Amino acid sequence: MNLSDNGRNRSDHSRTETIVIINSVLNAPLILISIVGNALVLLAIFRTPSIHSTSMIMLTSLAFSDLLVGLLAQPLFIADEITSLTTQNPILYRLSAMIGFFVAGVSLGTITAISVDRVLALHYHMRYAIIVTNTRVKCTVGAIWLVMFLSLGFYFWDKYVFHLMAGVFSAVCIIICTASYAKIYRIVRVHQQQINIQHNAVENENAGNKMHLSRVKKSAMSTFIFYICMLFCYFPAFVLLTLFGTLHVAWKPEWTFSSTLTFMNSAINPFLYCWRLQELREAIVKTTKQLFHPPNGN
């Protein structure tokens, strides 16, 4: 009986060690990409005043939270995983969990705010500048950071309640993003129908409508791509958070890889910015060239 137990324990330890090694290998390049990619995004935004807008305020918040994922959350997560193979370090475990939830929560909340912003930009395009002001956007971004920071207090009160709240928060964000994309899709369809009806209109006006429709479609496609990536990266963690908070059952291997998947979103986002946002892409390229080839470096 003891030999059987010992063999099973060795097998479990070997399996756990393999999972930790695989997870560490997966996270290593993601850490580098998150740091370099989001640092370049932030630097490009700060160095290019011409692209500053309300949308860029939210994008700056997202890039900064994603940068913290690479700088703090992932290294602590991997350190805790490796340490757990030999001994449990409760301080490292709690610090890793709290910072991970905090920065990932800010990223998810900011992505949700961006999706709502795109709906407002399309639905109220004539009054968008009046409705969405710099002050309101800064207050919204500040509220996201503050709420996520204050929610960490629940971790010390009851970890099951904290995980359940994190699951509910993720569900709300996913629902809002889904509703936002559905609304954007309907707006695009309406604009498409209006263009089709106006075949007999003045040519210049029709060309202007087609140009507007093209911008609407591009914005809708960008939003959809961000939404799909967010859903792919955050949904598994949402499911496990909800199950852990309600059933008090932890699936260690599944949670390990779902965390890595969540962190992956922070590495993907800079590529999405460069791909879908031309102004930001040009600013990043210009900033990168300036870093490697300074004007006074000849």
Image (cartoon, grey):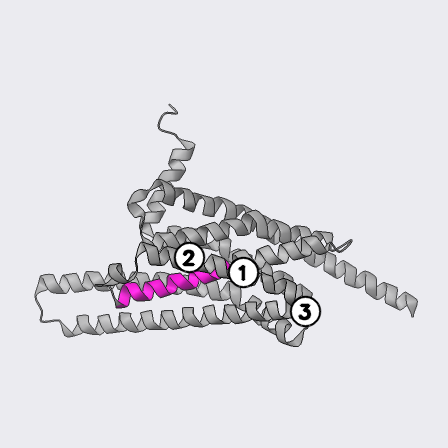
Q: Which residue is mark 1?
A: 150
- Give residue 289's position: percent from left, percent from top: 38, 36
Q: Was residue 115 drawn as part of the magenta stretch in this picture? A: yes
- As helix, strand or loop, the secondary structure at mark 3 comes to loop
* Residue type marked 1: Leu
Q: Nearer the viewer, mark 2 or mark 1?
A: 1
Left of 280 or right of it: where is 98?
Answer: right
Q: Which mark, residue 36?
A: none
Q: Which mark, residue 141?
A: 2
Residue reaching furthest to the bottom: 247
Q: Is residue 253 above or below residue 32?
A: below
* Residue type marked 3: Ala
Q: Residue at x 77, y 54 (%)?
A: 87
Q: Main secondary structure of the magenta part?
A: helix
User: Taking the image as drawn, is residue 38 in sight?
Assistant: yes
- As helix, strand or loop, the secondary structure at mark 1 comes to helix
Q: Earlier in the sequence, mark 1 or mark 3?
A: 1
Q: Which residue is mark 3?
A: 250
Depth check, front residue: 261 or 64: 64
Left of 241 or right of it: where is 114?
Answer: left
- Give residue 118's position: percent from left, percent from top: 33, 63
Image: magenta residue range? 106-123
